Image: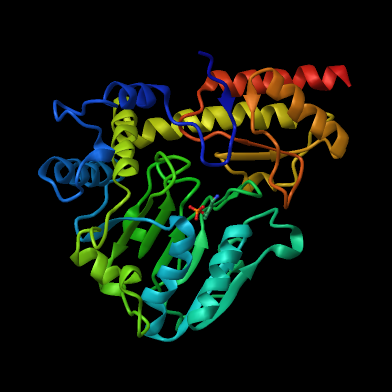
């Protein structure tokens, strides 16, 4: 068996220790004689797993008690719609900071349900930087302000939490959740697909304040946060195995010292790659330094043929899925929590060797 360093933007690497534990429990979970995915979601054993994962997430993220936690299907994409459907009816208006592919997707959904307006839009500069607080054109009458903290495709990150007064903040954290400690109380809704930092695809986590809900009418039953809260995320069969696996990832994070330790390690890993970029005469990045992502490092040689040769040679050396998103081209190294320093150092060394060879 040989494992590669997988730089995929998601689904992405899962810590090896987690995969091994899942393998150990594959045929018999805790003496039950079955795998977790074979259990009834309404049975006692699974209920304990499900509630346990919520408790672990609350502890790891320090989620205040009055926030609700939901485990849903439909990925982060369904949350583009659900956030709008559940919040916009307060005033019928909402603000969206459009700083990349997915925030543009959320904006599009917001427009289906009310007067969604762009309070910032960096498409004219190819989403290469995050707007400053004073560049946000905020409407005090908006029902909420939506933004995406880490732009997976373009490799930018909001390195501050926007101040929006009394208007609740809704944040897509799909590609940065659990990468660093965060003050959850600054947010009205946090949502994220699991397949980058939390485990396998098929699960979206939503953390929300129930008092800010103002749903459109009618609202489909599954998409009604209040109904999901009432049913404890079990209106229907939840993504049982994905939730269980996320629990193993949370155990792994805890064993390594929690989110403060994740941040310190992630910062060091990102610095290795950004240093390699800054010291290179071949590789460049379009991202403004202050907006650099700690999770997705986007770069290129400026020459499509060389980029292609780089991606192929890296794959031959055990560093896979480095091809950039089709909207950007070039390369993208996604270095979520599970990517070890060893993988990042190997990539930086490979960048230097490649540069010397061309
Ligand atoms: N938001 C962000 C920031 C993402 O990176 C992604 C997926 N790459 C999505 C939303 C969409 O997620 P999903 O595929 O889970 O719907």
- Total label count? 0
- The location of residue 343, given as percent across then percent down, is 57, 21
- The location of residue 267, given as percent across then percent down, is 52, 33
> Residue 236, relative to residue 196: is it above or below?
below
Name of the residue lying farthest toward the left: 44
Name of the residue lying farthest toward the top: 1
- The part of the image, by quadrant, that contains residue 124 is bottom right
> Residue 236 or 286: which is nearer the viewer?
236
Q: How is the image coloured?
A: rainbow
- The location of residue 207, given as percent across then percent down, is 32, 57
Residue at the image point whose x is 31% and y is 62% from the top: 208
> Residue 32, relative to residue 103: is it above or below?
above
> Residue 293, relative to residue 163: is it above or below?
above
Taking the image as drawn, is residue 176 in sight? yes
> Residue 257, relative to residue 234: is it above or below?
above
Check the picture and name the quadrant holding the C terminus.
Answer: top right
> Residue 337 or 120: which is nearer the viewer?
337
- The location of residue 231, given as percent across then percent down, is 19, 63
Q: Is residue 120 left or right of residue 215?
A: right
- The part of the image, by quadrant, that contains residue 300 is top right
Taking the image as drawn, is residue 187 in sight? no
Residue at the image point whose x is 20% and y is 48% from the top: 41
Residue at the image point whose x is 46% and y is 29% from the top: 338
Q: Is residue 304 left or right of residue 81?
A: right
């Amino acid at each position: 068996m040989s494992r590669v360093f997988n730089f995929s933007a998601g689904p992405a690497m899962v810590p090896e220790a987690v995969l091994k534990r899942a393998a150990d429990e594959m045929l018999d979970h805790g003496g039950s004689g079955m795998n977790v995915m074979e259990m009834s979601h309404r049975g006692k054993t699974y209920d304990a797993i499900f509630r346990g994962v919520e408790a672990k997430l609350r502890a790891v993220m320090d989620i205040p008690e009055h926030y609700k936690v939901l485990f849903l299907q439909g990925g982060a994409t369904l949350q583009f719609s659900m956030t709008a459907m559940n919040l916009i009816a307060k005033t019928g208006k909402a603000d969206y900071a459009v700083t990349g592919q997915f925030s543009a997707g959320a904006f599009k959904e917001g427009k289906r349900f009310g007067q969604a307006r762009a309070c910032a839009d960096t498409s004219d500069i190819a989403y290469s930087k995050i707007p400053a607080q004073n560049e946000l054109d905020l409407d005090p009458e908006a029902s909420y302000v939506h933004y995406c903290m880490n732009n997976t495709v373009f490799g930018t990150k909001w390195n501050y939490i926007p101040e929006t007064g009394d208007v609740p903040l809704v944040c897509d954290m799909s590609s940065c959740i659990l990468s660093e400690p965060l003050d959850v109380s600054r947010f009205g809704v946090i949502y994220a697909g699991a397949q980058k930092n939390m485990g396998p695809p098929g699960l979206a986590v939503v953390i929300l304040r129930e008092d800010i809900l103002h749903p459109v009418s009618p609202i489909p039953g599954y998409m009604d946060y209040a109904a999901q809260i009432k049913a404890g995320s079990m209106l229907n069969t939840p993504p049982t195995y994905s939730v269980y696996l996320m629990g193993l990832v949370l155990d792994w994070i805890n064993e390594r010292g929690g989110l403060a330790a994740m941040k310190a390690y992630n910062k060091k890993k990102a610095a290795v790659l950004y240093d390699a970029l800054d010291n290179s005469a071949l590789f460049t990045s379009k991202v403004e330094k202050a907006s650099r992502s700690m999770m997705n490092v986007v770069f290129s040689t400026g020459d499509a043929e060389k980029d292609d040769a780089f991606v192929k040679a890296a794959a031959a050396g055990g560093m896979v899925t480095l091809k950039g998103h089709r909207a950007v081209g070039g390369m993208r190294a996604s270095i979520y929590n599970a990517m070890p320093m060893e993988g990042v150092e190997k990539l930086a060394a490979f960048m230097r060797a490649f540069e010397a060879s061309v």
